[in-house]
Image (cartoon, rainbow, N blue to C red):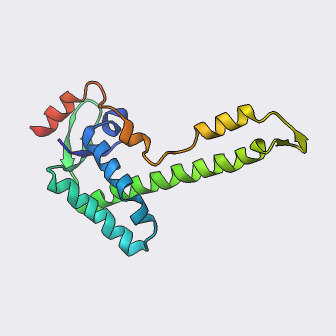
Amino acid sequence: RFDVLFGRNKRCTHHPGTMRCQLLVEMHWKEYEGQNKLERGLIAEKIVRMVHESGGRFLKWNGNKTAGAWEEVDDNAARAKVTHFFRGIRERKQKSSKTQANGSASKRGIDNGNETDTSESMTSSSSTELSSSSVFSKRMRAPGMDDISETLEA
């Protein structure tokens, strides 16, 4: 299924529907980032509509760890979830740019005014860069997710 699960545990974040929604958000990132608040809301609404049109739902667990049920949330909560995904991308990009900026002094070989060996710092800063296709598009289906999909389809 293409259901988007609310929650911060691996069971929710690695669910195929949640990962698909994150990929849709990444695909619309450039369009979203350059817009005003109203336009960003319309883009989020478009993604919610895309999930619904593909048979997906936005579900939140209602209960405790041992007993409860998945319940569908309204469109406002679904839109808030999508905008949360957009904020997550922005935060990762800002963190990456700060890491790159902090590494730039090391790349130039400057450490408190003294020359330093830059080979280690260049390797570590380049490994933290985000590529255009994020970690979400590279994740594989998490083991044990079939049982959740079966539960949600019922």
**Which of the image's four quarters has the C terminus?**
top left
Q: Residue 145, percent across and down? A: 24, 29
Q: Quadrant of the N terminus?
A: top left
Q: What residue lies at 35% left-to-right and 55% top-to-bottom?
A: 27
81 to 125, vertically: above or below = below
Q: Quarter of the image holding residue 36?
A: bottom left
Residue situated in front as seen by the camera: 39 or 131: 131
How many callouts does the rendering have?
0
Q: Tell me residue 115's x, y (percent).
A: 88, 39
Is there any visible trace of residue 74 in the rendered image? no
Vertical arrangement, residue 81 with respect to residue 147, above or below: below
Question: Residue at the location (31% across, 42% down)?
Answer: 19
Horizontally, residue 62 falls left or right of residue 32, namely left
Q: Quadrant of residue 5?
A: top left
- Between 54 and 130, the residue placed more toward the observer is 130
Q: Is residue 27 above or below residue 20?
A: below
Pick out the residue farthest to the top.
Answer: 143
Do we see residue 125 in this rendering?
A: yes
Which residue sits at x=26%, y=64%?
Answer: 46
Residue 62 x %, y %: 24, 43
Q: Residue furthest left?
A: 154
Image coordinates for residue 141, horizontal then vertical, percent: 29, 31
Q: Is residue 126 left or right of residue 151?
A: right
Vertical placement of 41 versus 115: above or below? below
Identity of the residue drawn at 20% across and 32% down: 148
